[in-house]
Amino acid sequence: MTIDTNINLERWPFRRLSLEETSKLVAKLKASGVTQAWAGSFDGLLHRDIAAVNQRLADACRQFADLLRPFGTVNPVLPDWHEDLRRCHEVHKMPGLRLHPNFHGYTLDDPRFAELLSLATDRGLIVQLALAMEDERTQHALHRVPHVDPKPLAGVVAKLPKLRLVLLNAFRSLSLLQCGEVAKAGQVWFDIAMLESVAGVTKLIEKVSPERVLFGSHSPLFYFESAELKLVESGLPEAVLQQIRIGNAMKLLAVSSD
Amino acid sequence: MLQYRVWDLHCHLLGIVGRTPEEKMANLLEIADRHGIERLCLFFSRTWSKTPTPEELKADNDFIMQAMSHWANRTHGFCYVSGEHVDFSLSEMDRCIQNGPMVGIKLWVAKRANERDLDAIIRKASELKAVIFQHTWFKQDGTQYPGESTPLDLVELAKRHPQTHFICGHAGGQWEMGIRAIRAFKNISIELAGSDPTAGFTEMAVRELGHERIIYGSDSAGRSFASQLAKVYGADISEEAKRMIFSENLRRLIEQPLKLKKTR
């Protein structure tokens, strides 16, 4: 059993993916032992009608409610973003949000980011912050998106002790040492989709503790097997692997539902 | 997941814990064993110097041969050479391949592959039937090193040596471009190592090149074995293609210098 905390529905803007149809992705995840998947939307990266993006995401997740949990997009640069936040929580009953500061054009020291985190925390929402979506060396020539600069993050997190923040695709921006510093600043978790180096999961745990690591595949953009095999490579005891696969995410979700 | 025989074309010992090359090798093999990887090819592992001096090339080759010394049945060494130091590189190939245990050469970023200086190195490698690995990237973020080759640079070299086989390291990073760049040149294979496990990579490579021109590698220890193995395990390709990519295509290339050594 696995909770995959990092998948996306809809279409990646720069390449067709064999699992971009939700039914195919769901089948693949189920066949791989995934019992729940936290889904954002690729449409949330570039679309400006975020309300429609989130409505489609909620509808798709409702269709596969035995597996998918929607994490709606909020873009605090757009006019009236507060309404998107309200709908994610009150209308769609989402457990959390997924933010893309680099695609949406703001930095982590932007007051709107701090306000969004604060409001999400007040509503008990988990916040997933995607620091990257792909290697900056392989981006489309006409659409280069720098990774999120994480320098302000520890300071921002320290001011919101009740915030539950999941960093997705963090490791092209953050060194493992920096991950440790951010983890100490507050309630912060890390998914393993973009974690690299040999036995990287073991190294990450040494810096942030086993309780702060979540399974995330970044499917369908990445081959799902990558995250799965990272656990094999770690050589960690089964109890720790279970925490990463499912235990930590269940605890995080349970607190959110309280 | 089905088990395959896996030979890894692309490993470094940089970043692996250990006080000596032998200790690092043992530690890397212990992790490789978790995936059932049979053999590892070793590339330079002491420093990331982009323009290594002759002394650095020699020290790195010594380091690799020392690391291999206890695991001759599981490792293959690639001699680190440079187009900036052609005469010295030729003597290193004599020392490490002709008279030593290594089976191939690694060309990194000291000089672009299209430079004529590399011709003497390629002729020598061809005589020794050594496997020729050229690092390539098409970088979109402005970090291309002055001497860093793209797959198009390698194509120029391969055109000058049509009877010699080359491996296009990393498939150029931007694999949609790398695959296209080398597609028409049958004496170039690609390796899958050292980029994110983006879905569709291996499927496109099989479709455009045929599975006999694709080789698995990881670029460990900077990359995990896991993310790179996933490019084959996760790909929607035939079992035969997976078997060839995971080991058979590389075995076929490595057997040639090994056979030549036996006949000498």
Image: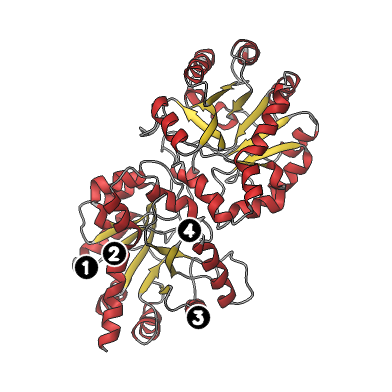
Q: How many marks?
A: 4
Label 2 amino acid?
Phe
* Quadrant of the rendered image containing residue B27: bottom right
Relative to B129, does residue B160 appear above or below in the rendering? above
Identify the residue under disc 1: B161
Label 1, label 2: how far apart the Cα atoms are: 9 Å
Discs 3/1, front: 3
Label 2, label 3: how far apart the Cα atoms are: 29 Å
Q: Secondary structure at mark 2?
A: strand
Identify the residue under disc 2: B166
Whether labels 4 and 3 share one chain = yes
Identify the residue under disc 3: B70
Q: Counting residues from the N terminus, which is met first, the one under dot 1 or under dot 2?
A: 1
* Circles 1, 2 touching at the beta carbon (< 8 Å): yes
Q: Nearer the viewer, residue A48 or B257?
A: B257
* Circles 4, 3 touching at the beta carbon (< 8 Å): no
Side (left or right) of B52 relative to B114: right
